Structure formats: structure tokens, C-alpha cells
């Protein structure tokens, strides 16, 4: 693994972007996995990333583990999943922004502001794409599709998080792919909503005639 001290600005921003976008899907899982990886020494920490050391605190790991477990089961129940996403509309963006902020060197205030804004914005977009797509899937009467998509999100979050920590040089590419996926989901949701409400208007007019 490349040492964190030798990471370039692009790699640091790539990791920050990837982590914040993934936090928009699974904030607690990202915090838990990062904390465990740091505690085991899998994630190297340079001097300017000491603020991330808080994630390796046993209390933080314990709370993140509880949140991860609660989210794992809540995410598999359609109505509970939608309620959970609604509650976390503010929590995930703030968490993503703080994670991105902690990754960037505090000696570069301008870069920290950029990371905080982009981290929060990225987490909000990812959350919106995830919540919207899952709301559409949750309308299905059968539970299999909801469970399958939720499990895929769990696996993808862990796999991509490991990948960006293990291969920082590819983290910017991962962040761009996640951003593209998020924008695609948002566009698909917009199309579905327009189709639903757009088809509802003419029908109501024709029925009135």
C-alpha cells in the first residue's frame, strides 16, 4: 500500500470524494470500516490526518457498529427503509462533509473549504440518488428486489472503500464513477416522476370529459 504521507492532492481529494459519496449510501458502515481499518493499521495516517484517529476510538466504533447493524436490517424492510432514508437526509450529508474535511490537510484552509462543500454536496447527491431509487423499488410488492439491492449496496460500499484505501491513485476515478452513477440515478428518478405525474394529468382531463 502507498503510504498516506506520499499521497498527492488529487489522491487526497479522490479519497475524500469517494468516502463522502459512499457515506451518502452507508454513513455508519463507512465510519465503522474506516475505524476498524485504522485500528488494525491497514490505513496509514500522516500527521495532518490525526483528526481521523477519532474513528478508531472504541466508542466511535461501537456506536458506528450499532448504527450499521440497525441500518442493515432497516434497509431490508421497504417502509422502514424509506423512513430511515428520510431521517438521514441531513445526517448523511453532514457526515460526508466532516469525513471529507478530516481527510484534507488543515494547513490548507482553502482546500478544506472545498473538501467540506464538495463532501457535503457529494453525500447529499448520493443520498438523494439512493433514497429515490430505493423509494421506487420499495413500491414493489415482493421483498426480494429490495433485499437484493440493499445487500448489493452493502457489498459495494465495503469493496469500494477498501479499493480507494488500497489504491489511492485510482480513488479519483472511483469518485467520478460514483458521481456519474449518482447523477444517472437522479435522472432516472426524474424521468419516472415525470412519467407518473405527466401521465396522471391527461388521464384526469379525459375522465373529466
Image (cartoon, rainbow, N blue to C red):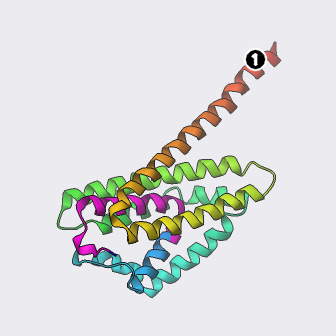
Residue occupying image coordinates x 52% and y 71%:
29
Q: Under tag 1, what secondary structure?
A: helix
Quarter of the image containing the C terminus?
top right
Question: Magenta includes 117?
Answer: no
Compared with 60, 140 (above or below) is: above
Q: Is residue 156 rendered to the left or right of residue 83? A: left
Quarter of the image where one finds residue 169: bottom left
Along the viewing direction, whichever of 38 and 99 lies nearer the viewer? 38
Q: Report whether 51 appears left or right of 60.
A: left
Q: Residue at x 48, y 64 (%)?
A: 160
**Magenta span: chief secondary structure:** helix
Give the magenta range: 2-29
Label total for image: 1
Image coordinates for residue 153, horizontal then vertical, percent: 59, 61
| Residue 66 appears in view | yes
Q: Which one is in front, 15 or 122?
A: 15
The relative height of residue 136 versus residue 40 in the rendered view (above or below) is above
Residue named by callout 1: 205
Quadrant where the N terminus is found in the figure: bottom left
Residue 35 is left or right of residue 82, and the answer is left
| Image location of residue 124, percent across then percent down | 46, 52
Decide which of 147, 93 is in the foreground and name it. Answer: 147
Q: Is residue 28 visible?
A: no
Q: Position of residue 122 (x, y in %)?
A: 42, 53
Q: Is residue 97 found left or right of 206 in the rendered image?
A: left
Residue 34 lies, with reference to residue 145, above or below; the image says below
Q: Residue at the location (70% across, 60% down)?
A: 148
Instruction: Give the residue at x 23% y 74%.
Output: 5
Decide whether residue 25 is among the magenta residues.
yes
Amino acid at each position: 500500500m502507498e503510504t498516506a504521507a506520499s499521497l498527492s492532492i488529487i489522491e487526497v481529494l479522490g479519497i475524500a470524494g469517494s468516502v463522502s459519496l459512499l457515506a451518502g449510501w452507508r454513513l455508519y458502515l463507512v465510519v465503522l470500516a474506516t475505524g476498524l481499518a485504522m485500528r488494525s493499521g491497514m490505513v496509514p495516517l500522516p500527521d495532518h490526518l490525526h483528526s481521523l484517529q477519532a474513528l478508531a476510538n472504541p466508542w466511535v466504533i461501537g456506536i458506528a457498529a450499532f448504527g450499521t447493524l440497525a441500518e442493515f436490517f432497516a434497509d431490508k424492510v421497504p417502509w422502514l427503509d424509506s423512513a430511515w432514508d428520510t431521517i438521514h437526509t441531513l445526517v448523511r450529508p453532514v457526515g460526508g462533509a466532516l469525513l471529507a474535511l478530516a481527510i484534507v490537510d488543515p494547513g490548507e484552509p482553502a482546500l478544506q473549504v472545498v473538501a467540506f462543500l464538495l463532501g457535503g454536496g457529494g453525500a447529499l447527491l448520493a443520498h438523494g440518488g439512493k433514497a429515490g431509487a430505493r423509494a421506487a423499488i420499495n413500491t414493489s410488492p415482493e421483498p426480494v428486489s429490495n433485499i437484493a439491492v440493499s445487500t448489493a449496496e452493502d457489498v459495494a460500499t465495503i469493496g469500494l472503500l477498501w479499493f480507494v484505501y488500497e489504491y489511492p491513485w485510482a480513488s479519483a476515478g472511483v469518485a467520478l464513477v460514483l458521481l456519474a452513477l449518482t447523477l444517472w440515478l437522479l435522472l432516472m428518478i426524474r424521468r419516472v416522476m415525470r412519467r407518473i405525474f405527466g401521465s396522471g394529468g391527461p388521464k384526469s382531463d379525459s375522465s373529466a370529459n
